[in-house]
Image (cartoon, grey):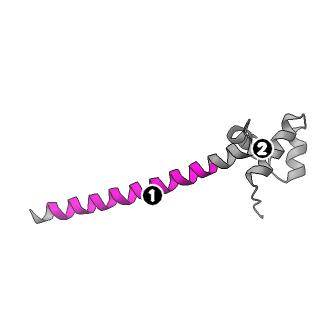
Amino acid sequence: MKRARFTEEQIIAVLKEHEAGAKTADLARKHGVSEATLYNWKAKFGGMDVSEAKRLKQLEDENARLKKLLAEAMLDTAALRELLSKKW
């Protein structure tokens, strides 16, 4: 099954349709997603504008990058400690 990827703008447009009174089942069928996906989108993007959603995506990407850097630094530190402990 092909996995559809929606942009933040598309997700927010679907959520605005839902807020306008469209039924969840109808929206899910129209856009080819499950009702659970719509509820997950609502939990994550509910009440946001497009600019806020883009900013959230940027922050998530930056957070992932920083976590990766921290993990690499901790790995290097652990390797150095192990190397030093063997010498003494």
Q: Which residue is mark 1?
A: 68
Q: Which mark is residue 23?
A: none
In the image, which residues are magenta?
57-85
Indicate the secondary structure of the residue bearing disc 1. Answer: helix
How far is the residue under mark 1 from the one under mark 2? Answer: 30 Å
* CA neighbours of label 2 inside 10 A, class few (<14), some (14 to 19), many (20+): many
> How far across and how far down the image is residue 86, in percent?
14, 64
Q: Which residue is mark 2?
A: 38
Q: Earlier in the sequence, mark 1 or mark 2?
A: 2
> How far across and how far down the image is residue 73, in percent?
35, 58
Residue at the left extreme of this rendering: 88
- Quarter of the image where the C terminus is located: bottom left
Indicate the secondary structure of the residue bearing disc 2. Answer: helix
Query: Can residue 26 be found in the magenta stretch?
Result: no
Left or right placement of residue 73 versus residue 54 in this view: left
Q: Residue shown at 69%/38% (left/top)?
A: 43
